[in-house]
Image (tube, rainbow, N blue to C red):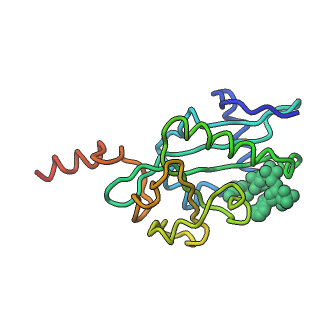
Amino acid sequence: MFEITTERPEDGPAIEDLLDQAFGYDRHAKTSYRYRRGRAPVRSLSLVARGPLGLVGSIRYWPVEIGHGGAPALLLGPLAIHPAHQGVGIGRGLVYQSLDMAWWARHRLVLLVGDLRYYGRMGFRPASPFGIAMSDEQPERLLAVELQQGALAEAEGPVLPWTGGPGGSVRRSLRVAAE
Ligand SMILES: CC(C)(COP(=O)(O)OP(=O)(O)OC[C@H]1O[C@@H](n2cnc3c(N)ncnc32)[C@H](O)[C@@H]1OP(=O)(O)O)[C@@H](O)C(=O)NCCC(=O)NCCS
């Protein structure tokens, strides 16, 4: 029996071990970490799956923005399930539960870099036909799901690290500096 709950601060070391196992010790060099460095995950959407012997799965999300208009979105990942417990629906459970929570929190759009054969079953589709791109990633691996109708049509351009959304703090200070 597995239970899905919000991540607790003391889960940190077990999550790091799980991610090292799933993605390797060099995972911090991946493109997606560019969006995570120096930023915290969205705490309310960071979920873990626990079994009788401890933590077996983790999902996190980071805020990002799209294009120079700064359309806000969430970047799903990393998602990892302990090898001994893969294939029994825990990954799907974490994705569905966190997407539901993101919908309730009024997030509009979720992106990820992953395999369409897996995430397509959960409603994700390629983002590149909507003009959304992530540099250094294969376009067919950049996937998206709308939580609010029309969110994909409103977002166009490169996926960028979060600066605070439209008129965000970094952009605002750049603008002030330029004036
Ligand atoms: C990918 C991963 C998160 C899936 O979690 P999981 O709990 O094992 O998956 P679920 O039980 O929800 O779903 C299992 C189904 O997905 C399929 N599946 C798993 N990974 C897949 C992939 N990369 N591509 C296509 N299908 C995949 C399985 O074959 C299985 O199919 P079935 O239902 O027809 O038998 C997990 O295998 C994992 O942690 N892998 C290592 C890290 C990783 O690759 N993370 C994803 C980064 S995008």
- Which residue is at the front of the view, 35 or 66? 66
Q: Quadrant of residue 9?
A: top right
Task: Note whether 112 is above or below 55 in the view shown.
Answer: below
Q: Residue at x 50, y 56 (%)?
A: 34
Nearer the observer, 23 or 81: 81
The number of numbered badges drawn on the structure is: 0
Residue 116 lies, in percent from the top left, at: 68, 65
Q: Nearer the viewer, residue 135 or 150?
A: 150
Q: Position of residue 135 (x, y in %)?
A: 48, 68
Q: Is residue 154 visible?
A: yes
Q: Position of residue 162 (x, y in %)?
A: 41, 48
Instruction: Identify the residue at horizontal 27%, vertical 49% (top origin).
Output: 171
Q: Quadrant of ligand 1?
A: bottom right
Q: Is residue 152 left or right of residue 53?
A: left
At 68% from the left and 27% from the top, the residue drawn is 10
The quadrant the N terminus occupies is top right
Direction from residue 47 to residue 69 in the image, left or right: left
54 vs 149, left or right, is right
User: Can residue 22 be seen in this snapshot?
Assistant: no
Residue 26 spot, x, y in % from top left? 65, 57
Query: Looking at the image, which residue sits at the far front?
Result: 149
Residue at the left extreme, as displayed: 179
